[in-house]
Structure formats: structure tokens, C-alpha cells
Amino acid sequence: MTSESEPNIRFRRVLLVGFMGAGKSAVGEHLARQLGWRFRDFDQEVARRIGLPVHRIFEDYGEEVFRIQEERIAVELLGADRAVLSSGGGWPCRRGRMEGLSQSTLSVWLRVSPEVAVERCRQSGAVRPLLEGDDPVAAATALLEERRVFYEQADWSLDSTAGDPEFLAERLARQIRTDPERPIRE
Ligand code: S3P
């Protein structure tokens, strides 16, 4: 990492939030590469530490056990420097989570329509327990509506419905480097 390419900003980390299928992990990996920072994904860390995929933690121990582990990981990772973090879709959606983020964390909401979210989750093959019912689009629509109030608290927001993850990451990286105090809302 050269000093020219190191963004001169007050943010120490970027936190991507948003619904399942918004592209948080894909955009996060590209963004980390472009900034020369490391990438960490809350779900991957929980799965690694418990030794089970997230959907199995839901099945075997219940959602609340997953949420407790998820918050433990979040507290740790939100102290990391020079890191791009991808939260699970549900992490921001408890009172105090978004409000509690430090000034040195740039939060970005990746927006996605329920239809595209469900399609991406289906294609990815990773089981999302909260979208496993008979009508996943209806479930996603209702859940997204409930969660919007939390996601909206992010510093920036970017529509990922039609966007290619690398292109979205470039958009974020460019703004972080050139004008980080001007929020992206597009
Ligand atoms: C969840 C989102 C998932 C995972 C779990 C619950 C949620 O992560 O944490 O299935 O409540 O929205 P992704 O947003 O990475 O799919």
C-alpha cells in the first residue's frame, strides 16, 4: 500500500448494511480491495466460530442464539481499523445499533427491491431462514418495510438493485477518496 493510494479520511472503517441479497458481501470485497483494507463479514465470522453455517445455527439453536453471537462479533469487528465490514441483514435492526456506531465508522445502506433480493438469494444457494416460507417475495416485502427505519439511519445510501458489485464499489471508493464528507444518496 503506497501513501498516495491511502485515503486521507477520518473514517477508520466502512460498514455495509441492508437487506439479504443487497450485495453487501460482494460489494464489500471489491471495496476492501480498492481501498487496500481488509474485508470482514459478520455472518462468515459467526459461522466460523460456531462451526456451523448460519442457517444451521438458526435450525439447531434458534434465531436468538444467532443474534447473540452476531452482536458479539459485531462489537469486535466494529473496533477494527482499515476494514470494510458487511453486517448480516438483521444486525442493524435493533434499537441502538445504528445510533451506537462511532463517528469513525462510515455506514452505507445498499438498497435492493424485495424481488431482486429474493432472486439473488435463490441464485446464491445459501439458505436464508427468514425467506424460506411459501411466498418469499411477500416475506421480503414485509420485512424490508419493518427494517427500513433502521437502514435509513446509515450515513450514505446506494441503490444496488441494478448495479454490478464492482461498479458500486468503485462509486463508493471514489467518493471516499475524493469527497468523503459529502454523503452519497443515490
Ligand atoms: C439475516 C440475514 C442473513 C443472515 C441471517 C439473517 C437477516 O445475512 O445473517 O440469515 O435477518 O436479514 P445476509 O444479509 O448476509 O444474507
Image (spheres, rainbow, N blue to C red):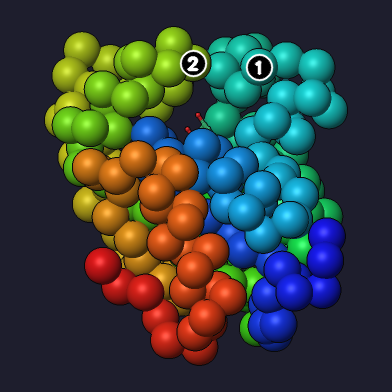
Identity of the residue drawn at 66% across and 40% down: 41
| Secondary structure of the residue carrying numbered label 2 | loop
Inspect the image, locate mark 2, and give the three-letter code of the amino acid beneath it. Answer: Ala
Badge 2 is on which residue? 126
Q: Earlier in the sequence, mark 2 or mark 1?
A: 1
Specify few, some or many for label 2: CA neighbours under 10 Å numbering under 14, 14-19, or 20 or more: few
Identity of the residue drawn at 45% across and 44% down: 166
Rendered image: mark on residue 53? 1
Residue 172 position in % (x across, y down)? 47, 63
Query: Taking 14 as reference, is 153 left or right?
Result: left
Identity of the residue drawn at 61% across and 22% down: 54
> In front: mark 2 or mark 1?
2
The reply to whether the C-beta atoms of the residues labelled 2 and 1 are less than 8 Å apart is yes
Residue 80 position in % (x across, y down)? 82, 61
Question: Does residue 21 sit above or below 112 in this rendering?
Answer: above
Please identify the quarter of the rendering in which residue 6 is found.
Answer: bottom right
Query: Taking 55 as reference, is 144 left or right?
Result: left
Identity of the residue drawn at 62% across and 54% down: 34
**Quadrant holding the N terminus:** bottom right
Distance between mark 2 and mark 1 Cα atoms: 9 Å
**Count of picture labels:** 2
Question: Does the closest atom of ligand 1 sit within 8 Å of the Cβ of label 2?
Answer: yes
Inspect the image, locate mark 1, and give the three-letter code of the amino acid beneath it. Answer: Pro
